[in-house]
Image: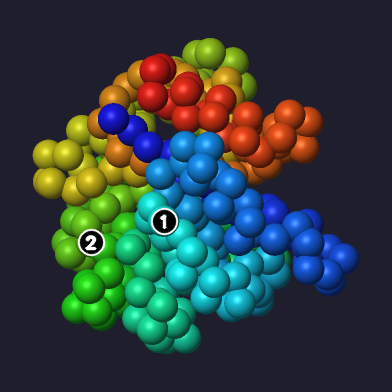
Amino acid sequence: MAKLGLNVDHVATIRQARGGVEPDPVAAAAMGELAGAEGITIHLREDRRHIQDRDLEILRRTVKTKLNLEMAATQEMVRIALRIQPEQVTLVPEKRQELTTEGGLDVILNAKLISDTVKRLKDGGICVSLFVDPNQEQIKAANKTGTDYIEIHTGAYAEAKGWKEQEHELEHIDTAIKLARKVNLGVNAGHGLNYVNIKPLAALGGIEEYNIGHSIMARAMLVGLDRAVRDMVELIKYA
């Protein structure tokens, strides 16, 4: 059955806006796990705009489910990951000026760098996932790197206007899931998912984990984090 990986980056974003100590993403992660999230996702960016090294250090000691560290394929981040030992690393593209991750990795263009990074992480005992668009050629290239998983970038689906366009994007994702499964890659998904668009996506099947942050934190501001997480867990499990 599919799982929810709760992304707590936005809790850190609010904290950093005032330069204080609250709200604490570590506390949010603990509450999320109690509410049914089966993984905690954080993105340690090179510019440290939200999640800080302190957060990663404490979360490694306190997360009871699975810690998924999103990061760029850089020497600094690989060193940090090998020291901290999260259960999973998800390699993502990263631009300094972007508001959020804008697309999947270009695995074809960066095959050597990504393959070398995957090997170093796996040799260190860490499960690896690559954040890619639902593109068959990128998935084939991802498979050649030795990665364990792909995470399908669902941004185009989330931004689709109208059912026809959404259905078109769902077809791309469904094809990507089937190809990944055929070559024995695990499949996760994330980006732009909310309480409405999760249902048709989850109904496809074949996705093991959905990494979701923004929509859950937005709802939590109105109904509380416990309720927001429980609502999303229910939608994923019973879509």
Image quarter (top left, top right, bottom left or bottom right) of the N terminus: top left
What residue sits 52% from the left and 76% below the top?
57
Q: Position of residue 109 (x, y in %)?
A: 35, 66
What residue sits 38% from the left and 68% below the top?
86
Q: Position of residue 194 (x, y in %)?
A: 58, 30
What residue sits 49% from the left and 46% below the top?
33
Q: Position of residue 218 (x, y in %)?
A: 72, 37
The numbered disc on residue 219 is: none
What residue sits 21% from the left and 65% below the top?
145
Q: Position of residue 192 (x, y in %)?
A: 57, 38
Residue 234 vertical placement versus 136 (above, below): above
Residue 174 vertical placement versus 12 (above, below): above
Amino acid at pointer 2: Thr
Residue 15 at least partly seen: yes
Residue annotated with mark 1: 64
Residue annotated with mark 2: 147
Alpha-carbon span between mark 1 and mark 2? 24 Å
Which color mode does the image show?
rainbow
Q: Secondary structure at mark 2?
A: loop
